[in-house]
Image: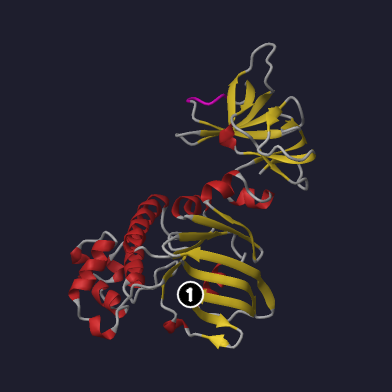
Amino acid sequence: MTALRLTGITASHPRTPVLHGIDLTVASGTTTAVLGPSGCGKTTLLRVVAGFMRPDAGEVRIGDELVAGPGTWVPPEKRGFGYVAQEGNLFPHLDVAANLSYGLPRRERRARERVAELLELVGLPAETASRRPDQLSGGQQQRVALARALARRPRVVLLDEPFSALDPELRATTREAVADALAHEGATVVLVTHDQAEALSFADEVAVMHEGRLSQVGAPSLVYSSPADRRSALSLGEACFLPGVLEAGVVHCALGDLPADRRSGAGPVEVMIRPEQLRLADARTGAVAPTGEVRHVAYFGHDALVEVHLDTADVLVRARTSHTPPPPVGSRVEVTVDGRPHLLAVGSAPGIG
């Protein structure tokens, strides 16, 4: 079943166009992450869904109900959604129990059982109920904000970059707790974020947005390995781009003759390779594989990003390697490709992104 459907949504602030014909369908019980840089229109899209902003054109349906469209406008309080903002927006003068109760129908506001159930759902101890927001950590505040959003058992939960203000370790643990709670409730979720790792790990589908348009929507593994264009590729992580020529299912480029991810077509293409697809080894005399010189190494402990200048062309590529220690700057290495590169239409300069 479809929980949310957007058709032809355009919107502006107030005279500046922001969204341009957005089509998006979110299946019931799934999570969709809208990923893109700041200013691309992600939050505007969420505000249109919530009813905080009227679209200039198009339709919004929550379930089978038309909530925005020509001649139709359902106010936010009647749309049946839960909303979690970046800062949580808890009432500072109320304790946690009162914050959670505020999200309940009036007949349930004194139901301590529901408050205890919500706290347990987001992994917080029962004694949290008597604390004020300023007595909680940032991660605890976001869990309370989620619990409040789930209090009414909403049809759709909207998350507006709810983890971005947290430090990396707290962000990861809070995200896991939130994901578990949402899965337990069988909630339908739309998350907007600029964090590629968050989008890929948190969502069932990723919708890549640029300048108010969706360039690609699909499963995380699909949009990562087979992006629609160069800009979408870079939204989801590091990538190397090389000019190539496709012929009979083989692409010829500076990294050699490689099996392509498509067999039809022929002619110039742009070759995209993720850093983890590149394998490095000490260069040998008479090596068959392409060779190059290590120009830079960024070491992260669990792995390293090694920049290599290829001998076969005036091109830099980046390889992600777990070898410890990584090859030093100035050393000579062989570079091979694991798996098939993804081919894009010609239109971008060679190099790394």
Q: Residue at x 74, y 41 (%)?
A: 270
Q: Nearer the viewer, residue 221 or 53?
A: 221
- Identity of the amino acid at label 1? Ile
Q: In this view of the protein, can residue 23 be seen by the observer?
A: yes
Q: Name the quarter where the C terminus is drawn.
A: top right
**Which region shows up in magenta?**
324-328
Q: How many marks?
A: 1
Does the stretch in magenta take in 303? Answer: no
Q: Where residue 282 appears, x then y in whole percent?
A: 59, 18
Q: Residue at x 24, y 85 (%)?
A: 107
Q: Residue at x 50, y 54 (%)?
A: 199
Q: Where residue 259 appears, x then y in whole percent?
A: 67, 31
Q: In this view of the protein, can residue 237 be seen by the observer?
A: no
Q: How is the image coloured?
A: secondary structure
Q: Quadrant of residue 136?
A: bottom left
Q: Residue furthest right?
A: 267
Against 208, residue 84 (above or below) is below
Q: Is residue 281 left or right of residue 343?
A: left
Q: Is residue 65 left or right of residue 296?
A: left
* Mark 1 residue element: strand
Q: Residues within 10 Å of mark 1 (few under 14, many from 20)?
A: many
Residue under pointer 1: 62
Against 221, residue 281 (above or below) is above
